[in-house]
Image (spheres, helix red, strand yellow):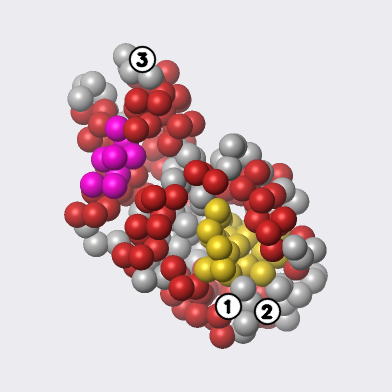
Amino acid sequence: MAEIKTAIFDFDGTLVDSEHYHYNSWVEVLNDYGAELDYDFYIKTYAGTPSPINAKAIIEQFDLPISREDLTYKRERMAEKLVKESEVEFMPYAIETLDLFKEKGIPIYLVTGSPRNNVEFLLEKTGIAKYFKFTITRTDVKNSKPDPESYLTAIEKINLPKENMVVFEDTRTGVASAKAAGLECLAIQGNPNLKDNVKAADKIFDSLREATQYLEKEGRI
């Protein structure tokens, strides 16, 4: 396997433990319509998928009298409110992993299905903006994950052979996006009930530490 010269990270659920904010924002918005969204169903079905795609599916699921655009807007404003009011926690070994790549001189990039304003706020709030050479968000592309456009855009900007890149993702949509772009993808998924969602990844690990230990053992970083 080739040497890793660039690492690309997903954001929500891979580096930052933010899925509960996304879930709670949907719960708050759906309360207005008397609809209840089960947490386990949300995590298995909707986690990691951009809001407009989820909005369309949720409207169909609950037969809601609202447009996809309006539901997306309400959901994202609610998510912004919840994030600003709460502490944001990192996923296990997230900072250690970013530090490891930085110490090894391997550039780090961020590719996320969240909108730019939310991502930039969280990057500043958590203090990790300094790690990334650039960030590609849903706002920057026409078709976000699971479409490969986000990763294809990153590949073009990085301008290195694909075999020298590795992607870290945690959801089905993220893995699908990375693989459709022709990239090696390591899935970070510690929930046994969700591992099947990321089975298309090249390898699945319980944590970022396990993934980086694997890369070090293989002599790739």
- Secondary structure of the residue carrying numbered label 3: loop
The disc at residue 63 is 3
- Residue at left 69%, top 63%? 158
Tell me, yes or no, whether the two marked residues, 2 and 1, touch with CB atoms within 8 Å.
Answer: yes
Q: Is residue 31 above or below residue 179?
A: above
- Residue at left 33%, top 39%? 76
In the rendered image, residue 195, in percent from the top left (x then y), is placed at: 54, 50
Magenta segment's dominant SS is helix
Q: CA distance from mark 2 to mark 3?
A: 49 Å
Which sits earlier in the primary sequence, circle 1 or circle 3?
3
Q: Is any atom of residue 199 visible in this view?
A: no
Residue 110 as seen in the image, left or right of residue 77? right
Q: Which residues are magenta?
A: 74-81
Q: Is any atom of residue 168 visible in this view?
A: yes
Rendering quarter of residue 186: bottom right
Q: CA distance from mark 2 to mark 1?
A: 8 Å
> Which residue lies under the disc numbered 2?
221
Few, some or many residues within 10 Å of mark 1 (<14, 14–19, 20+):
some
- Residue at left 24%, top 54%? 84
In the rendered image, residue 4, in percent from the top left (x then y), is placed at: 71, 72
Q: Amino acid at mark 1?
A: Phe
Which sits earlier in the primary sequence, circle 2 or circle 1?
1
Instruction: Assess whether residue 196 is covered by the magenta stretch.
Output: no
- Residue at left 42%, top 18%? 60
In the rendered image, residue 107, in percent from the top left (x then y), is placed at: 62, 73
- Secondary structure of the residue carrying numbered label 2: loop
Q: Amino acid at mark 2?
A: Ile
> Which residue lies under the disc numbered 1?
101
State which quarter of the image contains the N terminus. Answer: bottom right
